[in-house]
């Protein structure tokens, strides 16, 4: 049963990932990305990472995908989306990437993984929360500072030019 | 019951598709989406190996990757919008100001 679910989720994920990387319309790529994220969230559930699956839906589908859709609507007139979206050097890049995949899958298959035979389905939220507050406190804080910096940077970058000019005297006074 | 190899091969497929997207496409938006694909592939590997080993560290690493992905998407897309406002294009072959 779990094998069947895994195969179905893999097909969903891989096909929509191919749409993301291969379709000529930006909108179709964004919708393909939605289904890839959902398939990956399903795979997390199958691998007994319930809280991560919920986070995947919230952060990727609710945050990043909406952001990408807004960027698509702001930067592309929908009518000429096809013209603005060509590919180049299709064959060499495909060869390189398939070679990369061969290397990685060879490593994945030939390595002796020190694993248990089955996944234990147990809630993971409490364990993750405890680890984030004890053993991994420093990475947690570093990531929060990174998020703050990204927030300020994104707000500053996407500000219109007139607002930037209005901001400048303040900044010079600050120095 | 399949082992972690199935998950790892799937994550390799996702990573390779994302790499094709990054290398072969000219639209900067699609390149950003493909980077997200590659990060998702890495996350699948982290989560699968972590849960098969019964070690929650994989989940923690997946969290870190997700946070970096969110920050990257926000900054990258705002740079993209700024470039589009300036140049009226996001085709990376036309954005060659820094090339000499």
Image (spheres, coloured by chain):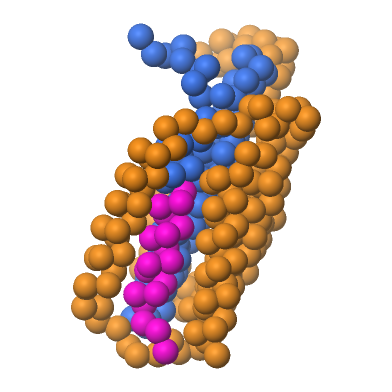
Chain colours: A orange, B blue
Q: Is residue A55 above or below residue A85?
A: below
Image location (x, y in percent) of residue A135: 36, 68
In the image, is B54 to the left or to the right of B78? left
Image location (x, y in percent) of residue B15: 42, 54
Total count of labels: 0
Magenta span: B1-18
Name the residue located 52 percent from the left edge and 78 percent from the top edge. Answer: A6
Would residue A57 be seen by someone viewing this image from the given angle? yes
In the image, is A36 to the left or to the right of A47? right
Q: Is residue B25 above or below residue B93?
A: below
Residue B17 counted in the magenta span? yes
Residue at the limit of the structure toward the front, as seen here? A91
Name the residue located 77 percent from the left edge and 32 percent from the top edge. Answer: A78
- State whether the magenta stretch is mostly helix, strand or loop: helix
Name the residue located 56 percent from the left edge and 24 percent from the top edge. Answer: B91
In the image, is A81 to the left or to the right of A142? right
Q: Is residue B88 above or below residue A56?
A: above
Q: Nearer the viewer, residue B94 or B55?
A: B94
Residue B83 counted in the magenta span? no
Q: Nearer the viewer, residue B45 or A151?
A: B45
Would residue A156 be seen by someone viewing this image from the given angle? no
Name the residue located 31 percent from the left edge and 64 percent from the top edge. Answer: A105
Q: Nearer the viewer, residue B33 or A14?
A: A14
Q: Is residue B79 above or below residue A57?
A: above
Image location (x, y in percent) of residue B51: 41, 79
Image location (x, y in percent) of residue A89: 42, 32
Residue at the limit of the structure toward the right, as seen here? A79
Question: Where, quadrant-wise, is the N terminus of chain A in this rendering?
Answer: bottom right
């Amino acid at each position: 049963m779990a094998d069947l679910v895994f195969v179905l989720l893999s097909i969903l994920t891989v096909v929509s990932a191919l749409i993301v990387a291969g379709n000529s319309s930006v909108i179709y790529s964004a919708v393909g990305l939605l289904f890839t994220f959902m398939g990956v969230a399903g795979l997390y559930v199958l691998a007994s990472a319930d809280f991560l699956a919920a986070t995947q839906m919230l952060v990727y589908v609710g945050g990043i995908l909406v952001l990408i859709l807004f960027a698509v609507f702001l930067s592309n007139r929908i009518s000429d989306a096809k013209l603005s979206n060509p590919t180049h050097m299709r064959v060499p890049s495909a060869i390189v990437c398939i070679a990369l995949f061969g290397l990685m899958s060879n490593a994945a298959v030939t390595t002796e993984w020190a694993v248990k035979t089955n996944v234990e389905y147990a809630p993971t939220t409490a364990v993750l929360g405890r680890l984030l507050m004890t053993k991994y406190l420093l990475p947690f804080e570093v990531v929060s500072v990174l998020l703050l910096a990204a927030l300020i940077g994104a707000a500053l970058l996407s500000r219109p030019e007139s607002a930037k000019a209005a901001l400048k005297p303040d900044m010079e006074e600050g120095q | 019951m399949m082992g972690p190899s199935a998950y790892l091969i799937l994550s390799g497929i996702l990573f390779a598709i994302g790499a094709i997207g990054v290398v072969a496409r000219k639209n900067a938006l699609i390149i950003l989406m493909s980077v997200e694909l590659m990060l998702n592939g890495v996350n699948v590997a982290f989560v699968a190996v972590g849960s098969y080993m019964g070690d929650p560290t994989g989940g923690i690493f997946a969290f870190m990757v997700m946070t970096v992905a969110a920050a990257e998407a926000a900054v990258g897309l705002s740079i993209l919008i700024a470039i589009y406002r300036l140049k009226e294009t996001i085709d990376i072959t036309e954005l060659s100001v820094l090339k000499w």
